[in-house]
Image: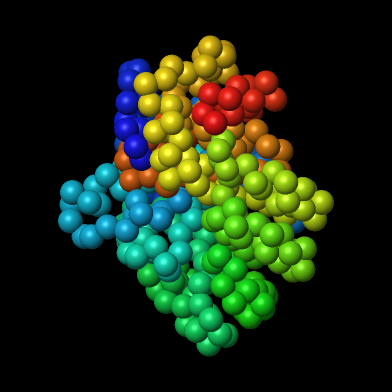
Amino acid sequence: MLSRRRFVSGCALASAGLAVAGSTRFALGAVPATQALQMRAIPSTGERLPVIGMGSSGSFDVGNSAAELDPLREVLRRFFAAGATLIDTAPGYGNAEAVLGRLLAELELRSRAFLATKIGATGRAAGLAQFQRSLQLLQTDKVELLQVHSLQDWKTQIEVINELKAQGKTRYTGVTHWLDSGHDELAEVVRAVKPDFLQVNYSVISRSAETRIFPIAKELGVAVLVNRAFDDGRLFARVKGKALPAWAAEAGITSWAQAFLQFALSDPAVTAVIPATGKPDRQTDNLKAGSEAVLTAAQRQSLIDLVG
């Protein structure tokens, strides 16, 4: 992210000696203390998810060196210690599935994860083969959410995903897109197949989802995951050198990243945001956004005016 480090609060953080509950034996150790994450319901079942999740595009596409993997271990430690669960990945994200699967197994954290991946293939056989490869790389026998990646061959792949759901290989179905130009087709697909989840890009400067996607999600009871909440770093470039708005402290916001994530979460259609990061301090900063109340309409407009 562009110069994001300067936006992360430098305040001293308390540490907490937490251990993973249940069957997980890996000690999380000292991690920065965070307030409890807010939870929102998945409309199709009522199951509740923490509002801050994590993407893996770019951030987990790394090699096998200690210099590359050690920060990601800490990213995961902080993520789960805060009570977060949802991690989104895909076969198209380079080494992300393999790295994520390796670290979750090594840290014995798979049982804590709400793991989402995607099928981005053409044809039934290719879709099934790709998913089997994802299971191998992720070192698991099932995932919590399986999505059609950017609507690729969606008619075929949504049938494949529904079959896999019936077999217990996934609990939820989904469809995704990451560009404003795909929103019309995404809306049509969601209306046609009514998946459990949709995933879409949304940010202070990319608000097209408000017009077509969010209303359909609310109408049909589809959970919404937000990708690109920082608009690939462009938001940080736009506020470089700018002070946070006067109301930020009152809202519990100490960084621009928190403000941007809170903007996305303040639309009632949104279930969770999934910012990707490979930096432990940024992970802590992102997670803090999930413990605060959502922005008011006036605060949302203030951000639009400041950034737009």
223 vs 109, nearest the viewer: 223
The residue drawn where x is 65% and y is 33% is 266
The residue drawn where x is 58% and y is 25% is 305
In terms of image quadrants, where is residue 187?
bottom right
Q: Residue furthest bottom?
A: 125
Q: Locate residue 264 relative to residue 2 in the image: left or right.
A: right
**Which image quarter holds the C terminus?**
top right
Is residue 32 shown above or below 135? above
**Which image quarter holds the N terminus?**
top left
Task: Give the mark count.
Answer: 0
In terms of image quadrants, where is residue 204?
top right
120 vs 97, nearest the viewer: 120
In percent of width and height, residue 22 lies at: 48, 49
In percent of width and height, residue 21 lies at: 46, 44
In percent of width and height, residue 62 lies at: 27, 57
Is residue 167 shown above or below 138? below
Q: Locate residue 298 relative to residue 136 in the image: left or right.
A: right
The residue drawn where x is 80% and y is 55% is 220
Colouring chosen for the image of the structure:
rainbow
Is residue 48 among the parts visible in the rendering?
no
Is residue 153 among the parts visible in the rendering?
yes
264 vs 103, nearest the viewer: 264
Q: Residue furthest right?
A: 219
The residue drawn where x is 68% and y is 64% is 185
Q: Locate residue 17 relative to residue 116 in the image: left or right.
A: left
Is residue 49 shown above or below 133? above
